[in-house]
Image: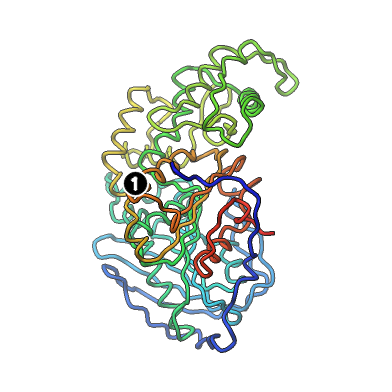
Amino acid sequence: MKRILTLVAAAIVPLAALVPLSSSEAAEPSACTNFSVKAPQGAHVDSVTAVDQPGGTVTFPPTPPFPNDPVADVPAYCEVTVQLSHPGAGDHVKTVVWLPKTGWNGRFQALGGSGYWAGEFGAPWANAVKAGYAVASTDAGVGPSPFTADNWALKDGQVNQGLLKNFASRSLHDLAEVGKAVTNQYYGRAASYSYWNGCSTGGRQGYVEAQQHPDDFDGILAASPAINWDRWTVAAIWPAVVMNNEHTYPTKCEFDEFTKAAIQACGIDAPQKCHWAPERLIGKTILCEGKPVTITAADARVVRKIWDGGPWYGLTRGTPFDGLAVSDGQHATPFVVPDSWVRNFLKLDPSFDTGKLTYAQYYKLFRQSQAQYNKVIGSDNPDLSAFKRSGGKLLSWHGLADTLIPAQGTVDYRKRVERELGRVDSFYRLFLVPGAGHCVGANTPTDPLGALVKWVEQGKAPKTLSDLNKQ
């Protein structure tokens, strides 16, 4: 890659300081009733409901393990729910829009999902309204579970193609059209700017929008994106396949020792360039829960295979193993999201045990997933020329210590875009974040949306990681 932007000190204007609507531009909202929504192409509007909500402290049902804390001081808002269906799909898609009654900043924001969640229906939604956005999200008709597709993937023993299409792409464009139309009707004018905001699955969805519907959003924030979905999902069970085939199950304590040693040897700034050998720990005795444990050659062999990856990128050295390499000392437990993909979409059998896969069977499934689903949900088309012509801005960041989705896949995509289009920093910027994990936690940027807004509306592109943080 010619330019992957990395850590240098700089500053950013906080989102609150960005220029809002002037008093002369501010729109007087209409009544929260009688919305008329035109169906997106290929869809049918089944129902539209609108409810006045008082705001205040807004609470949400628990969604373990994700925090869904109450959000205080939310302004009163109009909640519009649009039910869509697509002929022949047998689906029921819910798109929900929240419209602040006062303080609208003239912007529309669509929120992406996580895992098999197609959209966000929790605290980030209320915080977006609190910040003045008209905000919307969709469930794509696939249900409420972020971890498994068991409840919707199959229909009569075959892949439910209608719901898979919704989840992969169709519902995203529907969301953009419905959300912006409802916003326009409520305030009596179109939003001045429209933004996509998502991480993980939400990041993948942002790239889909840039690739397939380049006019939907002025700015797209796509963090830790699950692009290369057809390959990443199978690659993410590689650590469990390795442990089960090697019949060696290092404990968390042992894995942590390898992580610590790699960081000590290489630091955290460029783990993809680290080549520290796990064999150096062979014979070392450490204390695990007060008991001495000696690291073996078999332990080092497992770690090396996980770091090297199978047919796709492995974990970078120094990244915690907790997300993808989990065992009880006798059995490995694969990450539930990709495990569900393999069971349902590749084996067509929700009861299939991925713990019994041989290396040969695993590689065959990887090739199957790529051949069968890349054009459906791969989300990695490097031709962003239409998005560039539309004037859109794509801002992406990825943690170099991401425990679930290795950053190398995102870097590879960026390189492919540059091979396709040449220099792309004028509309597409990728930041690699040392020490940051998956979407949230230590070292992750604190205000990337603010940086994107500043880029779109003021033409001031973020140049360093510091530009993605509140000052």
Q: How many numbered marks have been drawn onto this rendered protein structure?
A: 1
At x 49% / y 49%, what residue is drawn? 430
**Residue 37 in view here:** yes
Name the secondary structure under disc 1. Answer: loop
Residue 360, placed above or below residue 267:
above
Q: Position of residue 192 (x, y in %)?
A: 47, 76
Residue 21, placed above or below residue 141:
below
Q: Position of residue 248 (x, y in %)?
A: 52, 18
Q: Quadrant of residue 61?
A: bottom right
Q: Quadrant of residue 356?
A: top left
At x 53% / y 79%, what residue is drawn? 78
Residue with the mark numbered 1: 378
Q: Position of residue 88 (x, y in %)?
A: 24, 61
At x 61% / y 26%, what residue is drawn? 262
Q: Quadrant of the C terminus?
A: bottom right
Q: Nearer the viewer, residue 158 or 425?
A: 425
Horizontal placement of 91 versus 471: left or right? left
Q: Quadrant of the N terminus?
A: top left
**Residue 175 in view here:** no
